[in-house]
Amino acid sequence: MKRIGFILKVKQHLIDEYKEHHRNVWPEMQAALRASGWHNYSLFMREDGLLFGYFETPESLEAAQAAMEQTEVNGRWQTLMSDFFELPPGAHPDQSLIVLEEVFHVD
């Protein structure tokens, strides 16, 4: 499994609403993530909205993203989530991840 770590920035005034959406992620979105190779997926957030995400995937980030792009539910979710992030106009969060280099791992 490849381990992927990334960051994004949630707009400060939308943090509570963002958290509420993630307490209620659609079951079909969760199923699509699993089927597309997004395993052990977690999100962590700092008080200022800096978001750290982590997941494991059998192939690569690009393969996991491409698989999700093929799902109808991902398009709806990305459209819903786009306004929550500090992104360039028209950008979707799943294509704007700032991927972090893994520098240490212990099993």
Image (tube, rainbow, N blue to C red):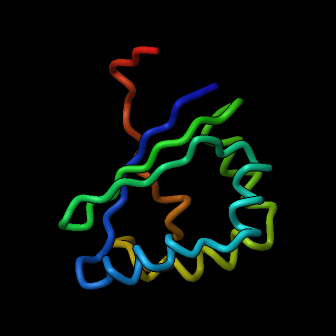
Front-lying residue, 26 or 68: 26
> What residue sits 53% from the left and 31% below the top?
3
> What residue sits 73% from the left and 50% below the top?
34
Q: Is residue 35 above or below residue 5?
A: below
Residue 82 on image: x %, y %: 49, 77
Residue projecting furthest to the top? 106
Residue projecting furthest to the left? 48
Q: Quadrant of the N terminus?
A: top right
Q: Is residue 35 left or right of residue 54?
A: right
Residue 5 on image: x %, y %: 43, 40
> What residue sits 38% from the left and 71% below the top?
87
Image quadrant in which you'd find residue 33: bottom right
Q: Is residue 88 left or right of residue 13?
A: right
Number of numbered callouts drawn: 0
Q: Is residue 37 left or right of residue 91?
A: right
Residue 11 on image: x %, y %: 29, 76
Front-lying residue, 91 or 36: 36
Image quadrant in which you'd find residue 101: top left
Q: Is residue 84 above or below residue 98?
A: below
Q: Is residue 61 left or right of residue 27?
A: left
Front-lying residue, 90 or 94: 94
Residue 94 on image: x %, y %: 55, 60
> What residue sits 43% from the left and 49% below the top?
53
Q: Is residue 54 above or below residue 91?
A: above
